[in-house]
Image: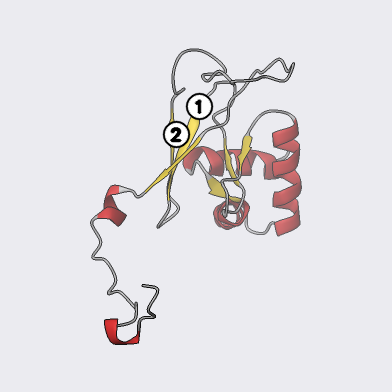
Amino acid sequence: MTAQRLAIMRALSMRPHATADDLADDVRVVIGTISRQAVYDTLGVLVDKNLIRRIQPAGSAARFEDRVGDNHHHLVCRACGSMFDIDCAVGSVPCLTADDDHGFEIDEAEVVYWGRCPTCRNLPTKPSTTTTSSTRSSND
């Protein structure tokens, strides 16, 4: 395995659910220079070899983790984007049973739980920017 690949694997073990840009920054601190393209190429190879996993929740940049080979899910904060691993929802792989499998042999269920983390839940809410009652339409 190349020095770049090892550096990326080490960085990922220290920062699960990191983006490619996060990993590039971490690796540059350790080995000096690495191009963004080299990071993306290396991540692609590591995903293809099933050494790492690529996760891309809706509206988020792709993230990577080195927890592979099990069937776990993710919990994502809608406000700050923090992500946590959640062990299998119920039972063994694939954890969930489809109502209609359409003839597929289902081997995995990918679940993303969404919510607000404790830190974001405790932040003061922003003042409302809605219109006052005198400017509302008659349909309100």
Which type of secondary structure does the marked residue at label 1 adopt? loop
Q: Quadrant of residue 70?
A: top right
Q: Disc 2 marks which amino acid?
A: Asp
**Residue drawn at 60 percent across, 53 percent down:** 61
Q: Nearer the viewer, residue 29 or 85?
A: 85
Q: Residues within 10 Å of mark 2 (few under 14, many from 20)?
A: some
> Percent from the top left, x then y, of residue 134?
29, 87
**Residue drawn at 63 percent across, 58 percent down:** 32
**Residue drawn at 34 percent across, 77 percent down:** 130
Residue 120 lies left or right of residue 83; in this view the side is left
Residue at the disc numbered 1: 72
Residue 96 lies left or right of residue 102; in this view the side is left
Q: Residues within 10 Å of mark 1 (few under 14, many from 20)?
A: many
Residue at the disc numbered 2: 85
Q: Nearer the viewer, residue 114 or 99?
A: 99
Residue 35 lies left or right of residue 68; in this view the side is right
Q: Measured along the vertical axis of the image, is residue 135 above or below residue 19?
A: below
> Percent from the top left, x then y, of residue 138?
37, 78
Q: Which of pointers 1 and 2 lies earlier in the amino acid sequence? A: 1
Q: Gap in Å between the C-alphas at discs 1 and 2? A: 7 Å
> Percent from the top left, x then y, of residue 62?
62, 49
Q: Which label number is shown at residue 25?
A: none
> Percent from the top left, x then y, of residue 66?
57, 33
Check if mark 1's residue and mark 2's residue have beta carbons within 8 Å: yes
Q: How many marks?
A: 2
Q: Is residue 35 visible?
A: no
Q: Nearer the viewer, residue 139 or 91?
A: 139
Q: Measured along the vertical axis of the image, is residue 31 above or below residue 129?
A: above
Q: Quadrant of the N terminus?
A: top right
